[in-house]
Image: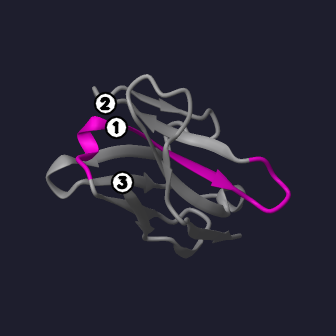
Amino acid sequence: QVQLVESGGGAVQAGGSLRLSCALSGDTISKYSMAWFRQAPGNERERVAFMSRISITVYADSVKGRFTISRDNAKNTLLLQMNSLEPEDTAMYYCAAKTAYSPSYNYWGQGTQVTVSS
């Protein structure tokens, strides 16, 4: 059974940085397309970054140039480097995994909270 466990969230001031990690167990991360989502109270869930199995990346306009998604296959881990954080980035962040040709994400983590103060 595949499991995803996020870590690295916390509270920072605007302009600061955080690096989120998502450890995948039960399978090999390179078999999956991976993504980071976030959801703030009262808002819809938003996909902020995506990485395909062949490492093509896609970012939401709101985070382009500030966030970087990467994958460490040796550690079976997905990363999200977040720089120049803004209060609007405050949300619960989730990682998700999708198998090839799946129309939806098959696996989700439990989330890690990011809070950015002004």
Number of the label disc, if any, that sits on residue 32: 1
Q: Amino acid at mark 3?
A: Leu
User: Spatial distance from mark 2 to mark 3, Cα to Cα?
Assistant: 14 Å
Q: Which residue is under mark 3?
A: 79
Q: Which residue is under mark 2?
A: 53
Residue 35 painted magenta = yes
Magenta range is 27-44
Look at the numbered disc 1 and give the secondary structure of its residue: loop
Number of the label disc, if any, that sits on residue 55: none
Residue 94 painted magenta = no
Residue pushed farthest right? Answer: 42
Q: Nearer the N terminus, badge 2 or badge 1? A: 1
Q: Is residue 53 above or below residue 79?
A: above
Look at the numbered disc 3 and give the secondary structure of its residue: strand
Q: Is residue 41 above or below residue 58?
A: below
**Picture coordinates of residue 89, whole percent (x, y):** 65, 57
Look at the numbered disc 2 and give the secondary structure of its residue: loop
Q: Amino acid at mark 1?
A: Tyr
Q: Nearer the N terminus, badge 3 or badge 1? A: 1
Determine whether label 2 and label 1 are within 8 Å by CB: yes
